[in-house]
Amino acid sequence: MNKPIKIVVVDDHALFRRGLIGLLAEIPEFQVVGEASNGDEALRVIQGSSPDIVLLDINMPGKDGVETVEALRERKNKVKVMMLTISQNDEDLIGAIVSGADGYLLKNTEPEDLRRAILRLVDGQSVLSPEVTGVVLKTLAHNQQVGEASPLSDRELEVLQCLSEGMTTVQIGLSLYISDNTVKTHIRHILDKLEAANRTEAVSKALQMGLIQKMD
């Protein structure tokens, strides 16, 4: 008999988390080895339980889902991560994939579809809910058209322009209608892509490269 697939469930809503754990417990192939309500707790649980799969919500207090995946990848942890969320927000979806998530499912997924999706992840396949597949395809098509004209995405350029105008993280979030955590994620990606040590250096490099315009 094959060993059960070890799963950690991470979600800040206790009722959903417990319900999901109960559902997974009824599936013979699966074994829930841990649970967490936020990203920091999740990293500790994952470290201690060595799961095969992490089912991870995106929008959580403290370290969110995208930041948690980034932290796992920075630690060279290759555990398979399935984002399980209600969010169909483009920024959340693309942010999750860029950070290293292996799948993205919505919480309205049927139990049998979830079971099959987890098995596909274990087999090395990627999984996307049908509702969000179109967003990924559009983004890939857009990036192909843009080519290498800019190392930054359109949203990253918007965030960078706001930084050049002296806006804070909170102000950028309000201006672009995105969360503070999403702003922080974009800024990290900007610093990485421009090989900048801080926000000021990133703005300086972007101005030199002609990526943004100096505001008078």
Image: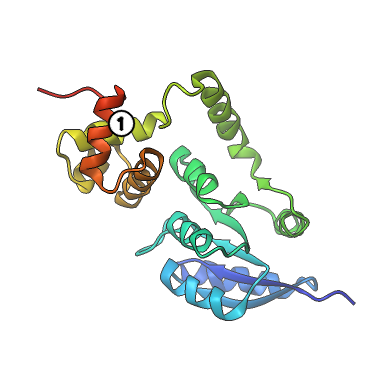
| Identity of the residue drawn at 44% across and 66% down | 39
Residue 88 shows in the view: no
Image location of residue 207, percent across then percent down: 24, 27
Q: Residue furthest right?
A: 1
Left or right: residue 162 compared with residue 72: left
* Element carrying mark 1: helix
Q: In this view, does 160 lie to the left or right of 153?
A: left
Q: Which residue is drawn at 51% across and 43% down?
A: 93
Which quarter of the rendering shows the C terminus? Answer: top left
The number of numbered discs placed on residues in the rendered structure image is 1
Q: Which colour scheme is used?
A: rainbow
Give how far across and how far down residue 144 sits, in percent: 56, 23
The answer to whether residue 148 of the structure is visible from this angle is yes
- Residue at far top of view: 145
User: Where residue 3 appears, x then y in whole percent?
Assistant: 81, 76
Residue 135 pos. (x, y %): 55, 33
Q: Going by the image, does 138 lie left or right of 180?
A: right
The residue lying at 57 percent from left, 56 percent from top is 84
Is 85 drawn above or below residue 165 in the view shown?
below
Quadrant assignment, res 28: bottom right
**Residue position for label 1:** 158
Amino acid at pointer 1: Glu
What residue lies at 49% left-to-right and 66% top-to-bottom? 11
Residue 160 in which image quadrant: top left
From the viewer's side, name the closer residue of 70 and 169: 70
Give whichever of 149, 110 is nearer the camera.
149
Mark 1 Cα-neighbour bin, 10 Å: few <14, some 14–19, many ≥20: some
Residue 38 sits above or below residue 207 on the image: below
